Each structure stands twice: as C-alpha cells, then as structure tokens.
Image (cartoon, grey):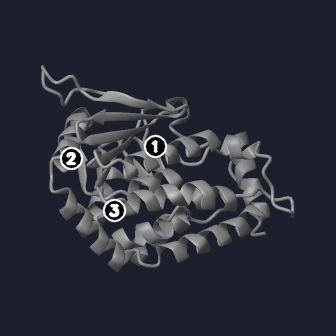
Amino acid sequence: MSDSANGADDPGPELAQEYETVNLWRQEGAATIELNRPQRLNAWNRQFGLDLLAAVQTVAEDDSVRAVVVRGAGRGFSSGADLKDQAGATDTTPGGHLDVRSVLDEVYHPIITTIRRMPKPALAAVRGPAVGIGCSLALTCDLIVAAESAYFMLGFVNIGLVPDGGSSVLVPTRVGMARATEMALLGERVPAAQALQWGLINRVVADQDFDAEVGALGARLAAGPTRSYAGTKRQLNAWLYGRMDDQLELEANIQQEMAASGDFLEGVTAFVEKRDARFQGA
C-alpha cells in the first residue's frame, strides 16, 4: 500500500492479517481490505471469495475498527469473476450445469450484505476496472472515491448472464431505472467522470492524488461519530434496501437459470478463446 498520505513521523498502516488473496491492514481505527490478485486484476476465484468473506467478517465484528476501506492491489479494483477459473470449475448441479447459486448464497451475498449492514462506514477506493461482482462490491460501500482512470461496468450480459451480487438493486438505487438498464443491457464501460455525473459514485480525483485522498477520507471517517454513522446506515438501509435479501434470492435463481443456457457456455468459451461471442438466444 502507498503511504503517500502519511506524515514523515507516521509509521503508516500495519499488516494485520495476510490471507492467500487478500490483505488486511490496520492504522488506528481504520482498516483497509486490500484485494490482492493483481496479476488477474483482482478477479474473484473460489479462494479469493473465501478470503474476502473472512476479512469482511473480521472487520465487521471488531469494535476497534471504526471505518473500512476496500481497495485493490495493482492496476485495478476488481475485474469481476475469474472466467478462466469458472471455465475449469467442477461444481455442478444435478442437471450437470455450473453451480453458481451456491457461491452466490454462501460467499458473494454474505460479503455484500455484511458490508452494507455493518455499523460502520465503508469506503470503496477504485482505481482501474470495477467490473461485474467487483462493481457490486464497490457499490455496496457507503462512499466511493474513484481515480480518473477508473471505470465501472456490469459485464454480465457479455457472457450471457444477468447482474448479480446485489447489482440489480445497488445500481438503480444510485442512478435510477434508465441508467441501470443501460448498464445492464449494454454492458459498456462507465468511465469515472461519467459515473460521477450519473451519481453512481461520490468523488473523482487525479490518479496522482488518489492515495492521499483515500487516506485522508478513511482517517476522517475513522475519527468521526461512529454511532451517528451506524444510525444513518440503518435509516438508509431501511428505506432503500429493505427487500435486499429477497432481491439477492431472485438474482441467484435467475443467474442459475442463465448458467444452464447455451449463451452462457458460448460467452465463457468466447472469452477464453478471445473472440466475439455468437449468441443464439438459447
């Protein structure tokens, strides 16, 4: 992690827990969850999901943690699910199709809901891509700061899937029906400046100022009125996300349907073979 925001006498963050694919840093009341598969742009494979869930649960349950920052190592925040990992997956349903529901129910959803509901503020620090479940991870945080190089994308449609990880509720609550539909159906990049204009994120900063801005805002949240923050989250969650569990279940049901489709098989195959997909609508 960069220590550009630290003063000359500040020892900077300390590594509190090192998982296989995630690092957990601590600096006074602020904890930073660092996604750490930079060679794959922090794409989610099975171990990554388990490590991230463990880190999220750790900071949520630790009363000494007063604010949480989520960021990616290397050039990106997260490029979403690791499709090469999925192409070789062996977990299948009784019908012989890829079992996506289990990982959604057991790993992805607990990560998203724990961050959304923990009684402390969460800040997503996004540099580079935040795609698919990586986009959902950013959007479930309370505040999102993006570098100018960042972009956001619901790329599910590009491989014949539907939005998941809560993005079917997290995106429209931020930007409304029209823009959420555009993101979901077209699967195009939304650059940081456009995301700010849409209201998808909170701030955009120059890449060279990114670490300093994230460090300052994380420290401010950690020094702030924790109970007030928790009360505010309860209010917003009650108004905006009261049916989130039902929506996550619906996402998982529909995503499992899509995983049994020929278009999904073609989408993943085309990605691995680095060619355009030829969808048949089946």
Seen at 29% across and 67% down, the residue is 233
User: Reading the chain from its start, which is encountered first: label 2 or label 3?
Assistant: 3
Judge the density around disc 2: few (<14), some (14-19), many (≥20) Cα neighbours within 10 Å: many
Vertical side of 246 occupied by 105: above or below:
above
State the CA–CA distance, disc 2 to disc 3.
23 Å
Camera-side residue of 155 and 5: 5
Seen at 59% across and 59% down, the residue is 156
Judge the density around disc 3: few (<14), some (14-19), many (≥20) Cα neighbours within 10 Å: many
State the CA–CA distance, disc 2 to disc 1.
18 Å
Residue furthest top as drawn: 8
Vertical side of 238 occupied by 3: above or below:
above
Which quarter shows the N terminus?
A: top left
Camera-side residue of 152 and 141: 141
Instruction: Classify mark 3: helix, strand or loop.
Output: loop
Residue on which disc 3 sits: 200
Question: Which label sits on residue 222?
Answer: 2
Q: In the shown orientation, is residue 207 left or right of residue 97?
A: left
Seen at 37% across and 72% down, the residue is 173
User: Reading the chain from its start, which is encountered first: label 3 or label 1?
Assistant: 1
Vertical side of 217 occupied by 199: above or below:
below
Displayed quadrant of residue 115: bottom left
Kindly identify the amino acid type of the residue bearing the numbered disc 1: Ala
User: Reading the chain from its start, which is encountered first: label 2 or label 1?
Assistant: 1
Displayed quadrant of residue 190: bottom left
Kindly identify the amino acid type of the residue bearing the numbered disc 2: Ala
- Image position, residue 75 (x, y; %): 42, 33
Residue on which disc 1 sits: 55
Q: CB atoms at circles 3 and 1 under 8 Å apart?
A: no
The number of discs equals 3
- Image position, residue 170 (x, y; %): 42, 67
